[in-house]
Amino acid sequence: MLQFGKRLALLMAFIFTVFVNAQSQNPCNFILQGKVIDEHDKSVLPYAVLLLKEINYSTTSDSAGNYMFRNLCEGYYTIIIDHVGCERVFKNITISGSTTIDFYAEHHTEQLKEIEIKELSEKHLETHSQTQLSASQTFKSSGNALGEMLKDISGVTALQTGSSVVKPVIQGLHSNRILILNNGVRLEGQQWGTDHAPEIDPFSASKITVVKGANSVRYGADAIAGTILVESAPLRDSAGVDGAISTALFSNGRQGVVSGYTQVNFGKVKPLAIRLQGTLKKAGNVNAPYYYLKNTGLHETNFSWQAGWKKKSYDVDAYYSQFSTTIGIFSASHIGNLTDLKKAFESPVPLEQSGFTYAIDRPYQHVTHELIRVKAQVKIASAFKLVASYARQYNLRYEYDKHKPLNNNLAALNKPEFQLELTTHTGDLYFEHSAVRQTRGVLGVFGMMQQNTYEGRFFIPNYETFAGGVYLVEQWQKNKFGVELGGRYDVRDVSVYRWVNSSVLNTKHYFTNVSGVIGISYDLHKTIRVKANSGIAWRAPGVNELYSDGLHHSVASIEKGDTALKVERAYNSSITIEYDCNCDRQTVIQINPYYNVIENFINLIPGTTPVLTIRGAFPVFYYKQVNATLSGVDAQISTYVTKHIQFVAKSSFLQAIDRTNAVWLQQMPANRAAGTVRYHFSDSKKMKNTIVESELLYVNQQWRVPSNADFAVPPSGYFLLGFYFSGRISMGKTYIDIGVQLQNVLDSKYRDYLDRFRYYTDAMGRNVSLKAKIPFSINLKK
């Protein structure tokens, strides 16, 4: 440990020696300027509207065609240019310093409607707390699963099943209470399981946004905790080819990841654009401090394509993705008898250990998820738009027990003990109008048909679901003040099929309810914005919560449902205070207190006595329903102490109470705080966007739990130290982004309360990762 600390100190000293004498430049004080020029006669185009899409920052060129954006941060942007008589221009640009870029627009005799330019420059009203991962954050966490990436956002933690399966937790809630939209389609997989991570490849997305708080009106029932929006970049609209190759290597698990995409617009058929993307990932056994975790490898293959046909008055878009993964399940979590299970709970190390290997043995799970979506939109009378989409999802899950069947013939087939097959059809139709008399909104309908079947050992039954909803959201905004009102009505019809006394019993469940939202946004000052939001949301109990009965292989536990469960009803209120000084020191503060009352809250809680089965000894968890209150505060501050040094601090505090029994609510994340000190180096001829940072994370012990209500006491709190270095190496007309990250630098031993395998092992130890991204671009002549 001492030698490692010395080497690390020498590395940090070397980095500072090389770069610290460079002159400073504020990375959020860059200027983008230039001219807007007619592509044909090279004359300047006055009064063109330019919009940086990712940050909703617009400006207008002056009478000489000059434009300017100030106070820009480094990153990747999509700029949209509109000028009367020209086709709309979309360009992908990179900001790594103050720069000058001229844009060329193709002039035509037909005139754009004035309302279209007005719509482009409008900023959508936001009354929820909303955070988008920046380009630098996305690159830093590249190669990680979606749930791991989102942990960088204040108020978002993770529910883990070992090191491979990570699910996002928003303000204490997870799984079916978080709605994930993948390119506008609500993700429908077996997301109810704590070991069932979102089946999404983060490399397929250009923008990932977390909207915290009840958001059921716009996106549908189940969005009690919040919504995660995963969106691809707009397709290329000008002739040419571009793309990027990304790689990541991790020391822990000896994991390798490679991903790439390419997109093309041939020019001769300008409305048509195509994108292809794919990812390969492979990892072996990960290690905690001092030992490997047996059978914790991971193999993953992902692929997606997108094609679009875009005209001025309409566009059609098709998207397909396939996510396929095989995940080893930690072998030492499957125990043969009650005596050994007790020993495992009490032992400081796993009872079963091994060395490193990429091989995945039983127990393991294999998951394949397919999504195909077709979307079309038509502009009506300039200010109105009609959008229709259809999507089909297919989710196949195999779960393999640790031991094969005793019958040799059956064992030779190596079939899964448990198979789930879920097919979902969804359709959306909505009518959207842009700002008319400061009011904009959307009226829509949603429908879903879903069928789930199982084979092998019983855990949840076969079922069919038919769901539908109608919603209306309107926003009014004028000057400093904005108001949002919305309402939604949903129905859900579930038919469950079970074998009872040698015959099929069909049990029907019918749920219906309403959701509502009211929110305001007010600019107290040019630097201070206040957003307040109150929502009513609901969630029907899942089939697993109603009927699960048996061994859940992947989490090595027995789960018991309750057919008497009722609908969850949530009353959510939150306030978001945002301060942005918009000055040279670039101080940004965000404080988000919230108060969430949930009637009939369904919680999976541990029993007090493990159960012995023919498959081994396992802890038992029960679905119980109580009235609950979750309240807390998420806070974050980012400020430049000097022009070089940036300080970022964030914290999340949650208090969850079971009001029915007057005790603390179980299975809730512990309070935590993190601080980052980041040094920004100024650009040189060969190196740009260079930073080095150190982060310290503290997670408190989760002491807010009922006494004697778990198989093991909550683990102690812990500190984790991390370092990160990144920069951009210029190589002629292109560049390479590079990053080096050290996680858990001190190789600290710890266990996290929300890790289902904390009963058996410490969490993952030190991890060093190397990351690189190489973009490319080719212009094609028309």
Image (cartoon, helix red, strand yellow):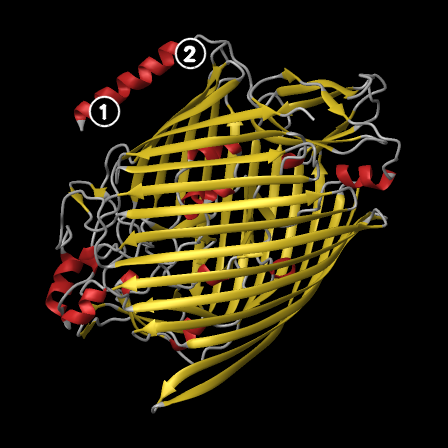
Q: Secondary structure at mark 2?
A: loop
Q: Which residue is mark 2?
A: 20
The amino acid sitting under disc 1 is: Gly
Left or right, 29 with respect to 355, comes to right
Q: Check disc 2: other Cα within 10 Å, few if <14, some if 14-19, many if 20+.
A: some
Q: Position of residue 145 (x, y in %)?
A: 40, 45
Q: Position of residue 255 (x, y in %)?
A: 30, 38
Left or right, 450 with respect to 126, comes to left
Q: Which residue is mark 1?
A: 5
- Residue drawn at x 48%, y 15% is 731
On the image, which quarter does residue 102 sit in? top right
Q: Position of residue 311 (x, y in %)?
A: 75, 42
Left or right, 385 with respect to 3, comes to right
Taking depth in this image into account, of 376 and 164 the one nearest to the observer is 376
Whether pointer 2 and pointer 1 mark residues with C-beta atoms closer than 8 Å, the reply is: no
Up the image or down, 567 lies above or below 725; here it is: below
Residue 70 in view, yes or no? yes
In the rendered view of the protein, which quadrant contains the C terminus?
A: top right
- Residue drawn at x 74%, y 23% is 104
Taking depth in this image into account, of 510 and 81 the one nearest to the observer is 81
* Disc 2/disc 1 C-alpha distance (Å): 22 Å
Up the image or down, 777 lies above or below 417; here it is: above
Taking depth in this image into account, of 156 and 735 the one nearest to the observer is 735
In the rendered view of the protein, which quadrant contains the N terminus?
A: top left
The amino acid sitting under disc 2 is: Val
Up the image or down, 404 lies above or below 37; here it is: below
